[in-house]
Image (cartoon, rainbow, N blue to C red):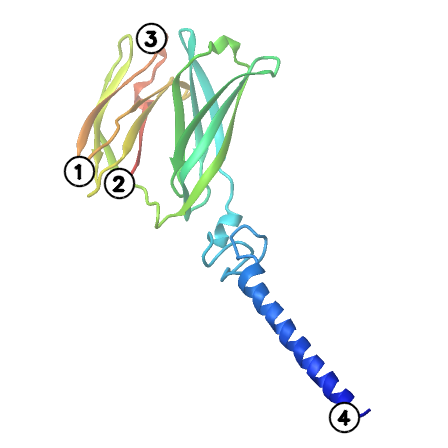
Amino acid sequence: MDHRLLKQILYGSGYLAVLFLIIIVAYLIWLKPTPTCFDGRKNGGETGVDCGGPCLSCEIQTLAPLQVSWIKNFPVGKNTVIATEIKNPNLNWGAENLSYVFHIYDIYDNEIYTLTKKSFIYSGEVKFLVEPNVNIEATQIGDIALSISDLNWKSQADFPRPETQIRGLKTELGLPIKIGGLFLNDNSYGLSRAGIFGFLYNQKGDLISASKTELGKTGAFEEKSFQLTFPQNIALEKIDSSKTKIYAEAIR
């Protein structure tokens, strides 16, 4: 091979190498997709695929779903009270926001009514959801199911449960039944809203009615009075007031 041909090959190889380098740099600068938390790849400082680092914690991907313990309904004239208990089995994670839907079916398993609401749940919490005045007669209901979605998970450190107290309870066994008391925000910060839930039981320990009331905003260390009112169609002789349970929920 003569020197002229060799020089041409070397120059050509050099030009190709430079061109290839320019293409690679251009791809890295302008064409390569920017890493995101939804691209199905471990990149951008992530510790797992689309998790960790700048993305949500990888622990969120292994969280257990919320559990529904029971759902009950009680007649209120031509309307219905619906109550349920849900549990968060995740001890280090709560949901700052969540959506839930009550699916109501008739005796033929046809969905006849849906009720959509929003709520929250703290880490490891047993929580109650009560809808006191659903616009459907209890006699129409064959079954009720609950679906929960759109959970915005937060660590326990980022979403701690406020300290609250309920005291001074007084029960009026009349028509209607009323339970009053005081709610205390035992924190140095205000609460955006608070709610009180009440449950009545009979002598056998069976749940026979439920009620709730909303308190709205509550200032730091503020105390508010509340009153729960229960439907008038409850036979007073069936109530065991010693089994009555009152719960509070609150969010900052």
Asked if residue 234 is positioned above or below residue 158 in the image, the reply reads: above
Query: Residue under circle 4?
Result: 3
Q: What amino acid is labelled 3 in the image?
A: Gln
Q: Nearer the viewer, mark 4 or mark 3?
A: 4
Query: Residue under circle 3?
Result: 232
Q: Position of residue 95 (x, y in %)?
A: 41, 41
* Secondary structure type for disc 2: loop
What's the distance in space between the residues labelled 3 and 1, CA to CA? 35 Å
Is the N terminus in the top left, top right, bottom left or bottom right quadrant? bottom right
Q: Nearer the viewer, mark 1 or mark 4?
A: 4
Residue 163 is labelled as 2
* Secondary structure type for disc 1: loop
Labels 1 and 4: the sequence-earlier one? 4
Q: Position of residue 55 (x, y in %)?
A: 47, 54
**Would you say the residues marked 4 and 3 are in contact, meaning their CB atoms lie under 8 Å apart?**
no
Q: What amino acid is labelled 1 in the image?
A: Phe
Residue at position x 37%, y 7% from top?
233
Q: What amino acid is labelled 2 in the image?
A: Glu
Evaluate whether residue 106 shows in this view.
Answer: yes
Labels 2 and 4: the sequence-earlier one? 4
